[in-house]
Image (cartoon, rainbow, N blue to C red):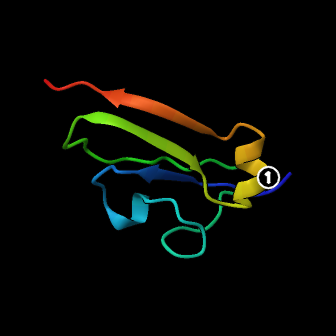
């Protein structure tokens, strides 16, 4: 029942897509959506996590890893 956002670690992206609530983005209210759009410019293994009440949301599983394969 609280806001959230997604912060991406290591990804080259526009500042407005970085997902740091209160700095680069407003929190996404419950029941609302936000579309993160950016072009991937590198490959490797990266992570993402909630960036709103991080300790609670990450502790509840709002985090993950993803792999970007080279072309």
Q: Which residue is rendered at x = 48% and y = 71% of the image?
A: 24
Q: Is residue 30 visible?
A: no
Quadrant (top left/top right/bottom left/bottom right) for the C terminus = top left
In the picture of the structure, the residue carrying the numbered disc 1 is: 56
Report the front residue among 2 and 7.
7
47 sits left or right of 56 in the view: left
Identify which residue is drawn at 19% across, 44% down.
Answer: 41
Quadrant in the rendering for residue 46:
top left
At 36% from the left and 66% from the top, the residue drawn is 15
Tell me the residue at 68%/55% (across/down). Answer: 4
Q: Report x, y in % for residue 65.
A: 48, 33
Q: Is residue 16 visible?
A: yes
Q: Is residue 42 above or below residue 32?
A: above
Q: Nearer the viewer, residue 8 or 1?
A: 8
Which of the 4 image quarters holds residue 61? top right
Residue 5 falls left or right of residue 65? right
Indicate the secondary structure of the residue bearing disc 1. helix
Image location (x, y in percent) of residue 63? 61, 40
Numbered marks: total: 1
Q: Residues within 10 Å of mark 1 (few under 14, many from 20)?
A: few
Answer left or right for 40 relative to 29.
Answer: left
Query: In this view of the protein, which residue sits in the foreground, 26 or 42?
Result: 42
């Amino acid at each position: 029942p609280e806001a959230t956002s997604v912060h991406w670690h290591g990804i080259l992206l526009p500042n407005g897509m970085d997902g740091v609530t209160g700095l680069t983005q407003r929190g996404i209210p419950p029941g609302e959506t936000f579309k993160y759009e950016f072009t991937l410019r590198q490959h490797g293994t990266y992570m993402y996590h909630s960036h709103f009440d991080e300790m609670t949301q990450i502790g509840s599983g709002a985090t993950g890893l993803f792999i970007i394969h080279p072309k």
